[in-house]
Amino acid sequence: MSWKKSEKLMDTIKHYASFPATGVSLRQMVQFGQRPSTGTLFRASQFLSEELPIRLAHRVQELNELPDGLSEMPSIKRVQDWYAQSFEELVTMSRPSISQEVRQRLIAPSKRNRESRILSQTTQNPSVRAGQYRSAPPEPEENGNGNGHGKIASQKRYFVASDGLEDWPPELNQYNIRFAQVLERIKRRHDSVVTTVAQGILEYKRKRQRMQIDHNIQAFLDRFYMSRIGIRMLIGQHIALTDQRQRSDPNYVGIICTKTNVRDLAMEAIENARFVCEDHYGLFEAPKIQLICDPNIHFMYVPGHLSHMLFETLKNSLRAVVERHGQDKEEFPVTKVIVAEGKEDITIKISDEGGGIPRSAIPLVWTYMYTTVDQTPNLDPDFNKSDFKAPMAGFGYGLPISRLYARYFGGDLKLISMEGYGTDVYLHLNRLSSSSEPLQ
């Protein structure tokens, strides 16, 4: 039986959508998840069971109010239903009844929590304007009573550890396991959101006979995908913390690696990008990539995010080099990847000799569905289940989404081109890990 959203559910969603999201920093996630007891995980479940519905409600509302008939596209409606269904599953999940004494223990801060207060202060990302990726849909025009700013964030905090005494009642542990199972189901449901929204934009472009999308839709997609990265990060982190088997590697806290080795990840991304390039163009050997990187540079990051950004940017460089110099060239110019470590940032520069991009086309590089490939492929929603596997030349999502991943944890992705020669891409990664999600 197919799922249908009720009017009552839409009213509840509207109520939740009036609250702002609460941003979390990478460092807070790590401090919080180092030794999660049953009580700590229960607190995190409580936080997420309030926070995730707010973020999901923002998306349902915004998908409902898109400009120019975009909300009516079948694929957009499908995605909206996924978000509404996930919202419903979270808010209707029953909570365990717990005694007053257990409640007090959960509220009492742990000893560890007092020392680490200093560490968990968050910093502002210099690349992001306040409100640029705000999670809530844009406010309607103020109505003159001066209080058009929606409701104040509730005082819930993600980073609250409970004392690690293991004599918690079994109901808490059962709830934690059940909650992680619900999150797992939600995560799977949303696997193909990126391609399904892209399909919705294609439907819209065909119906409206548009070549490009306007800046309102562009800004919506930026907010939408940034919010999705945040939701998936919180869900993935929570599932990994709940799953005891994940704890075998001392450098991992959930899906975050406290000693992410930049050189190892770069080598792997180079290999993958060259393999895809050889496969796509039928080359005996893809253009070479030279890596200049101190093997000991490591920092706290999500390896999956970094791999994705490196792979996407390297793939673009290789494609440009092959297309500029021709597939039958004996010796392609070498693309360079240089990694430098500063106090605030680790920066990775990728320099290719792929002929560059005209200056007038640079803004288009950051627009979704812009691709230099003549024919945008018709998207198969399943081809990209994991988000991280992409054809050589996809549908123009590589760079804009990579920039969101970079900005999500306080970094940035910049592109400087010399038309007639090549392009330099700068990937800045915040090594202090103290930047909060840019959702306000």
Image (spheres, rainbow, N blue to C red):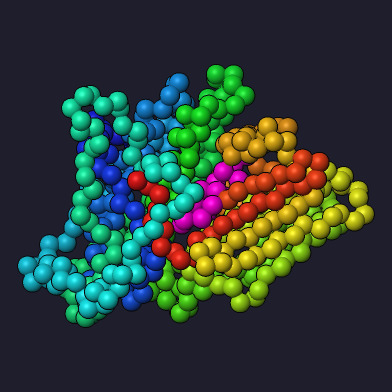
Bounds of the magenta segment: 395-412
Image spot of residue 54 (x, y percent): 29, 45
125 over 35 or under it: above or below: above
377 over 415 or under it: above or below: above
Q: Does the magenta stretch include residue 15?
A: no
Image spot of residue 324 (x, y percent): 83, 43
* Displayed quadrant of residue 309: bottom right
Q: Is residue 68 visible?
A: yes
1 over 312 or under it: above or below: above
Horizontal arrangement in the rendering, residue 336 relative to residue 431 (left or right): right
Instruction: Pick the residue in front: 197 or 111.
Output: 111
Q: Is residue 315 visible?
A: no
Instruction: Pick the residue in front: 357 or 250.
Output: 357
Image spot of residue 222 (x, y percent): 48, 40
Image point (66%, 58%), residue name: 349
Q: Quadrant of the N terminus?
A: top left
308 over 325 or under it: above or below: below
Image point (25%, 43%), residue name: 19
Q: Is residue 400 magenta?
A: yes
